Image (spheres, rainbow, N blue to C red):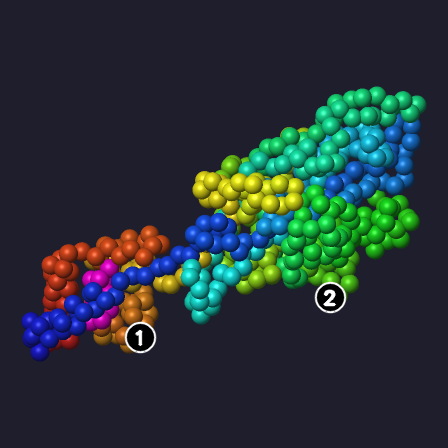
C-alpha cells in the first residue's frame, strides 16, 4: 500500500483522536472554610514536666519529677488557633507546691502532640472525590508559625511574670519567672495512623482516651494507654508506683499520651497509633515560617477516617533549652476565628487566615502526559521517534509508545502524541495543543517517515 493512500485512509481517525484525547490531571483541595468545606478537625494534647518536683535548696525530694497535667484543646470545638507538636522549654523554675517555685525543682518542659483528620473527603457530593478514584498522591500541608510560648500554653494557670521562689532556709522571695518565649522551631515530625477514633467536644465533661474537651475547660491526667500511674511513677512505667524512679525528661517525650503499637509497656489491644505502618511519615522540617509539606499518600484512609497522630522526634538524648525547641507549631483549622468563653463565634477569619489553615491536597487521574514516552515532561519529536521505532509492536508499554493502554503501538498512539504536542507537566488539567495545521503536518511527517523506515527495514520498494 502506498504511503499517501495509508495517510488518506487513516487521517479521519487521527484527527478524531487529536481532539478527543487531552491529557488529564485533577487536584482536589480540602481546607476548613475554603470553597464551602467545613469538615476538618484537629486537636492538641500536651503535658508539662517538672524535672525535680518539690526540690528546694534545703530538701531533695525522692519523688524525682512530675509529669504534671494534660491540657486537651480541640478546634472545631475548643477553638485553639495554634497546634504545637514537639518538645518545648517551659521555664527555668520548677514547682515545689501550688504557687511556689524553686530553681532546684526546675527546669520544666512541655510536650505537645496533635490529632488531625479531614472528614467527608470521599463521596458523591459537590467537591468530594469518588471512592472509586485512583489516588496518585496525597499531600498534607501545615503552616508553621511561632509556638505558643510558656505563658499562652499554660493559659489560666500561668503564675505571672514574677513568682514566689523558696530559697535556703525556706525563705521566700519574689523572682522573675524566666520562661520560654514564642519562636519558630525546627524538628523531625512523625505522622502516624491513629488506631482509635477521636471524639471532639466543647463542654465541661471529663477528657478521657478518645475524648477531648474544650480549650481550658478541663485539665487533668487522662487515661491514655500510657498514663501516670501515681505520684512516684512516670507515664507508661510498669514499676511499682511507690518506688522512686530515675528522673528522665527525655523518656517523658515518648512515655506519655497515646501508646505506639508494639510498645512493651502496654497491654495487647491498647495500641493507639502505629509508627511502623508502611505509610508512616518522618520528615525533618526547618524553622522557616510557612507551609510544610508531607506526603501522606500511604495514610489517606486514616487522615480521612479516624485521623493521624502527629508527634516530634528529638535528637537522641537532647532536651529543649530557652533558645532551642524541637518540633513545629501549626496553624489550626480554626485559625483566625475569634470565640467568646462559651464557644460562640464573635468574628470569622479573613481569607488570608483561612488560606494558612491545614490543607489536604489529593491528586488523581493521569499525571504522566499522554504521549510523553521518555517522561521528560514534554511531548516532542523524541517521543514521536519512540512511536516510530516501535510502531506495530504488541505487548507494549507507555515507554514504548502505547499511550492508550491497549498493548499495541499504532495510529491511535500517534494521534495522542499529536494531541499533546509540546504539553508541559504542570499538574493541571490544561493541555497545550498546537494549531491544527501544525498537528496535521506533524502527523503527516511522522507517518511518512514511519512508513519509509518500515519499507526500508522490510525490504519493500
Camera-side residue of 149 and 41? 41
Mark 2 element type: loop
Q: Nearer the viewer, mark 2 or mark 1?
A: 2
Q: Quadrant of residue 367?
A: bottom left
Placement of the N terminus among the 4 image quadrants: bottom left
Q: Position of residue 184 (x, y in %)?
A: 57, 35
Vertical relation: 35 (above or below) 108: below
Percent coordinates x, y for residue 421 in the rendering: 22, 58
- The circle on residue 407 is 1
Tell me whether the residue at label 2 lies in contact with that at label 1, contact meaning CB atoms closer than 8 angstroms: no
| Badge 2 or badge 1: first in the primary sequence | 2
Q: Is residue 7 magenta?
A: no
Count up the numbered dots: 2
Residue 273 in view of the camera: no
Q: What secondary structure predominates along the stretch shown in magenta? A: helix
Left or right: 307, with 165 as reference point? left
Q: Which one is nearer the viewer's eye here, 126 or 147?
A: 126
Report if residue 419 lies within the magenta region.
yes
Q: Secondary structure at mark 1?
A: loop
Neighbourhood count class around disc 2 (C-alpha, 10 Å): few under 14, some 14–19, many 20 upward: few
- x, y percent for residue 343: 62, 46
Q: Which mark is residue 31?
A: none
25 vs 8, left or right, is right
**Left or right: where 398 falls relative to 137:** left
Q: Which residues are magenta?
A: 411-420
Image coordinates for residue 361, horizontal then vertical, percent: 45, 54
Residue carrying label 2: 269
Amino acid at each position: 500500500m502506498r504511503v499517501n493512500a495509508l495517510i488518506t485512509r487513516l487521517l479521519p481517525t487521527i484527527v478524531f483522536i487529536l481532539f478527543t484525547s487531552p491529557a488529564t490531571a485533577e487536584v482536589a483541595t480540602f481546607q476548613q472554610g475554603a470553597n464551602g468545606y467545613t469538615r476538618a478537625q484537629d486537636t492538641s494534647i500536651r503535658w508539662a514536666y517538672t524535672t525535680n518536683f518539690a526540690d528546694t535548696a534545703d530538701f531533695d525530694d525522692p519523688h524525682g519529677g512530675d509529669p504534671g497535667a494534660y491540657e486537651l484543646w480541640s478546634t472545631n470545638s475548643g477553638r485553639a488557633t495554634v497546634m504545637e507538636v514537639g518538645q518545648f522549654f517551659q521555664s527555668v523554675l520548677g514547682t515545689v507546691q501550688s504557687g511556689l517555685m524553686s530553681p532546684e525543682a526546675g527546669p520544666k518542659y512541655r510536650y505537645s502532640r496533635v490529632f488531625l483528620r479531614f472528614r467527608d473527603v470521599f463521596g458523591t457530593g459537590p467537591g468530594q472525590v469518588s471512592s472509586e478514584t485512583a489516588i496518585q498522591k496525597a499531600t498534607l500541608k501545615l503552616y508553621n508559625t511561632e509556638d505558643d510560648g510558656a505563658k499562652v500554653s499554660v493559659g489560666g494557670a500561668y503564675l505571672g511574670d514574677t513568682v514566689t521562689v523558696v530559697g535556703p532556709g525556706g525563705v521566700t522571695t519574689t523572682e522573675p519567672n524566666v520562661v520560654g518565649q514564642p519562636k519558630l522551631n525546627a524538628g523531625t515530625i512523625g505522622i502516624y495512623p491513629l488506631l482509635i477514633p477521636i471524639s471532639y467536644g466543647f463542654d465541661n465533661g471529663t477528657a478521657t482516651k478518645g475524648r477531648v474537651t474544650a480549650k481550658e475547660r478541663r485539665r487533668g491526667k487522662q487515661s491514655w494507654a500510657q498514663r501516670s500511674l501515681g505520684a512516684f511513677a512516670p507515664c507508661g512505667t510498669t514499676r511499682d508506683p511507690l518506688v522512686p524512679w530515675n528522673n528522665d525528661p527525655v523518656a517523658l517525650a515518648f512515655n506519655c499520651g497515646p501508646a505506639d503499637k508494639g510498645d512493651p509497656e502496654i497491654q495487647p489491644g491498647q495500641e493507639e497509633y502505629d509508627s511502623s505502618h508502611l505509610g508512616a511519615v518522618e520528615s525533618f522540617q526547618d524553622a522557616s515560617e510557612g507551609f510544610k509539606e508531607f506526603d501522606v499518600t500511604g495514610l489517606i484512609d486514616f487522615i480521612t477516617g479516624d485521623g493521624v497522630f502527629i508527634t516530634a522526634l528529638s535528637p537522641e538524648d537532647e532536651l529543649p533549652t530557652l533558645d532551642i525547641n524541637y518540633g513545629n507549631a501549626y496553624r489550626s483549622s480554626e485559625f483566625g476565628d475569634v470565640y467568646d468563653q462559651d464557644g460562640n463565634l464573635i468574628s470569622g477569619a479573613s481569607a488570608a487566615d483561612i488560606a494558612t489553615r491545614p490543607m489536604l491536597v489529593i491528586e488523581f487521574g493521569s499525571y504522566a502526559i499522554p504521549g510523553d514516552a521518555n517522561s521528560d515532561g514534554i511531548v516532542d519529536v523524541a517521543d514521536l521517534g519512540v512511536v516510530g521505532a516501535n510502531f506495530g509492536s504488541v505487548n507494549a508499554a507507555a515507554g514504548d509508545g502505547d499511550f492508550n493502554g491497549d498493548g499495541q503501538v499504532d495510529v491511535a498512539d500517534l494521534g495522542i502524541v499529536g494531541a499533546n504536542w509540546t504539553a508541559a507537566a504542570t499538574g493541571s488539567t490544561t493541555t497545550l495543543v498546537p494549531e491544527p495545521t501544525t498537528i496535521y503536518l506533524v502527523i503527516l511527517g511522522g507517518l511518512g517517515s514511519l512508513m519509509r523506515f518500515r519499507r526500508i527495514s522490510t525490504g519493500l520498494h
